[in-house]
Amino acid sequence: AQSVTQLGSHVSVSEGALVLLRCNYSSSVPPYLFWYVQYPNQGLQLLLKYTSAATLVKGINGFEAEFKKSETSFHLTKPSAHMSDAAEYFCAVKRGSTLGRLYFGRGTQLTVWP
Amino acid sequence: EPEVTQTPSHQVTQMGQEVILRCVPISNHLYFYWYRQILGQKVEFLVSFYNNEISEKSEIFDDQFSVERPDGSNFTLKIRSTKLEDSAMYFCASKDRKNTEAFFGQGTRLTVV
């Protein structure tokens, strides 16, 4: 069975500070992992994905995530937060590359203070 | 850039009424999904659809729910007799054959009163 745990429903950082959003997964098979972002009143936008190639994945807007199999983690980071990064972030896992459904975490609301 | 389009953006309906949520997936995509997010909760999978039939459905997707691709471009979710607990944001998503990721629409906020 697949599941995702996002530690921390709310994270606050100052502008320019490191952003770290945590995601741990469980999967009975090698997973495909995703981070989606949801800006206010908008849909889910893909930030980045892990598909068993490089373990360090770079996404849009300066975000990256590292797949660590030993820790079953896929934490999202950004070296320097910007005000425009304020949004809700969702980690998701799926079993296969074609039809498989996504299993989402509960989401982490990121607030960026000036 | 191609995008998934959902209409309406917000729908209010009375309990017991039927609603149809509409989605236009990205044109060359072959796999279609509905998810929902009840306020304050996880995004949950409802159903996946491929080759004109349901491929997988969750325990949420009971007999009150149905999906249809009536004309080769639209993908609809019908709730026959809405309940208060159906109030949620409903997301449509689509995926092509090659890539792993699904692309999501803006969502339809359904409020059942």
Image (tube, grey):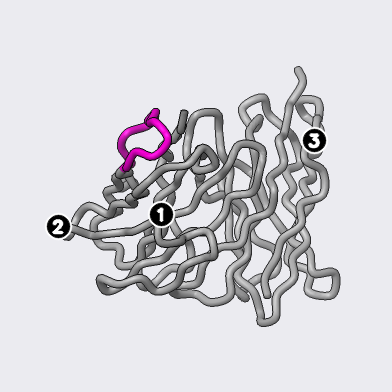
Mark 1 secondary-structure assignment: strand
Task: Spot the residue most to the left.
Answer: B71
Question: Disc 2 vs disc 3: which is toward the camera?
Answer: 2
Residue name at image x 33 percent, y 46 percent = B3
Label 1 is placed on what type of residue?
Answer: Ala
Magenta-colored stretch includes residue A74: no
Q: Amino acid at mark 3?
A: Val
Circle 3 residue: A11
- What element does badge 2 sit on? loop
Amino acid identity at mark 2: Asp
* Residue at screen point 71% across, 61% down: A4
Q: Which mark is residue B71?
A: 2
Q: Chain of mark 2?
A: B
Residue B94 horizontal/vertical position (percent): 37, 58
In the shown orientation, is residue A69 left or right of residue B20? right
Which mark identifies residue B93? 1
Do the residues under discs 1 and 3 have CB atoms within 8 angstroms? no
